[in-house]
Amino acid sequence: MAEDNDSEPIADGSGTGIVAPDDETPTWSERKERTQGLSRLTYEYFERARREDQDLRMESDYVERDVLGFPAWPHEMIRNFALTSFFVGLILFLSATLPPHIGPPADPSTTPEIILPDWYLYWSFGLLKLGPLNPELSILGGEKLMADRTYGVVANIVVVGFIAMVPFLNKGSARRPVEQPFWAGIGVMGVAFAFTIAALSVKNLLPMDSHLLFDLTFLIPPVLGLISYTVFRAMQEGYMYSLNRRYYRLRPPK
Amino acid sequence: MPLDEDKYPVESDRRRFVKGVVGGASLAGIATAGAAAINSTTSSSGGGGGSVTFRAIENTDGPAPRGMPQIPIELEEIPGEDDFYIKGRWPEVSEVEEQGKTLKVAREDIAGETYSSEWFQYCGVQTYPGVYPDATEENSDLTNYFRYNANSKFTWQNEEVSGGQKMKLSHFSDYETWGNGIGTAGIGKPASGSWRSEDLEPSETMAVEVIRSSRIEEAAQDNEWLSKTTDKGVMAHLNKCTHFCCVPAFKGQAGAANFGASDRVYCQCHQSVYDPFNIISTNYVALPRPARD
């Protein structure tokens, strides 16, 4: 930006036009993402709102100061001590009032009728039951490449690997599902799969045919993902309309 | 000007040499300490184990890799009663010379098949006192009698007999009609128990299942192996699922019906199914018994 002297910014294309990037300068991929549709619109609105706020700030005579934080002593330490005392007190109180619950050691010579891991591990437990997906390869003479047990463990690596890969495929610049219906659909599929694979893990307790359950485990997630994709796509237009309406109600055009 | 010009100390041949020596020495130190730590915290491998051919009740469904090993049985007459104790047969213990060492092995030939203690060395059972070939010489409490366990999945067992009692043939006299509402009645009467594990911790108890069935009786008529390892329709198997070592049961769970296993041995953990009336020859790699002091 030019200083407040006579020289105006050169806009006729004769200069280099190169402006050194600062922290606020969007990257090229960010610019590209904002060139069309809903993301372009929300970006413009945010940009305009930010600009207006900045102008208001410049006009005001309030002096802003940079406060980096409070000093560790005494401010932070008093707060930390209060929090620590509260939780230590809570632990002492609970350990004094609740009876110890540790039972006798596990007995490997009997197995209880219902034997399951903790509920939040059902998805992983379900992956151990993917035996029917383990292909019998004709190149190995109808043998399986790895045992069903190994296959189930490898399936965990595949799932965790995919979740680790998603941030590299899509950084998540959207703030709401309607902005990127495809990735929202992928997300819905993943969440649905977490539930269906958990249901598969307790197939012996569900009152339905286990083969049907196995098929549904892999059919339901893509169907739900597709439905949510189409719904989000259909919502985009209406969302832009209501965004426009609310924006101009809040900040009427001058 | 290179970016790291003001770096201290300056990169030089001498410095690279020192880095190499120090780095190599610390890696060697870490490797030595790691090896020593692993050596001190793990027990050295013991005797027995390796590839073994054994007789198993067939694994028909589920993730289990193979069937569960059968235990040959014998009936021992009870003096003064018209009844028999059901005993598991332990292979003859002998000393053999292998690779310059004298080892005790429990191994014998039955109907052309080598029956050995290595049939049972999987799922941690290889560490149980009862699986060592000469276990009964060292611990005189251990016997080959099958004994009932206390909390069984079978109502008849919980009501009519008590835990620790020796299994008798007369307890199975209604085997041709017995049923518990799971699967077909009259195909066999099961009991769960332990073997060679008297007064041991539950974590050292060899779980077994005994089934008396007319199907076994019929199959034994023209089968040399079955006629020598079963008697009056009584057969037994080590009750450890070969998948993840749970304890399954024959007609023990109503849920087995969902997996077509109400007339078979069904494991509730991962739905492995075994057919106790189809005894096949198969093989696996037995784990070595840890060396004992």
Image (cartoon, grey):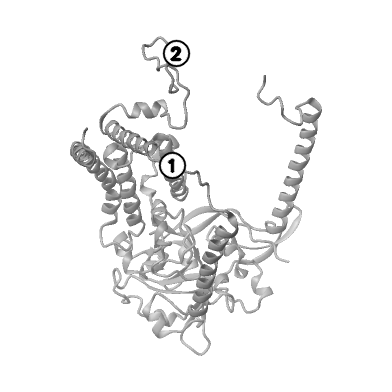
Q: Do labels 2 and 1 share a chain?
A: yes
Label 2 sits on a secondary structure element that is loop
Amino acid bearing label 2: Thr
For discs 2 and 1, the disc positioned in front in the rendered view: 2
Hey, which quadrant is residue B27 in on the image? Answer: top right
Q: Is residue A103 visible?
A: no
Residue B140, compared with residue B63, is above or below; it is below
Is any atom of residue B28 visible in this view? Answer: yes
| First reached walking from the N terminus: tag 2 or tag 1 | 2
Instruction: Return the chain for callout 1.
Output: A
- Quick one: quadrant of the N terminus of chain A? top left
Res. A19 mark: none
Residue at numbered disc 1: A143
Provide residue B135's location: percent of width, then percent of height.
65, 71
Residue A153 percent coordinates (x, y): 46, 49
**Crowd around label 1: few <14 · some 14–19 · many ≥20 (10 Å):** few
Residue A90 sits above or below residue A158 on the image: below
Foreground residue among A198 and B179: A198
On screen, residue B51 versus residue A120, left or right, reads right
Residue A25 at x, y = what percent?
42, 29
Question: Could you tell whether B112 is left or right of A134 in the image?
Answer: right
Residue at 42% x, 43% y: name it: A62
Is B140 or A208 nearer to us in this picture?
A: A208
Query: SS for tag 1?
Result: strand
Q: Name the residue under label 2.
A: A16
Position of A68 relative to B16 (above/below): below
Query: Foreground residue, A197 or A131?
Result: A197
User: Could you tell me the amino acid type at mark 1?
Assistant: Glu
User: Residue at the bottom extreme?
Assistant: B80
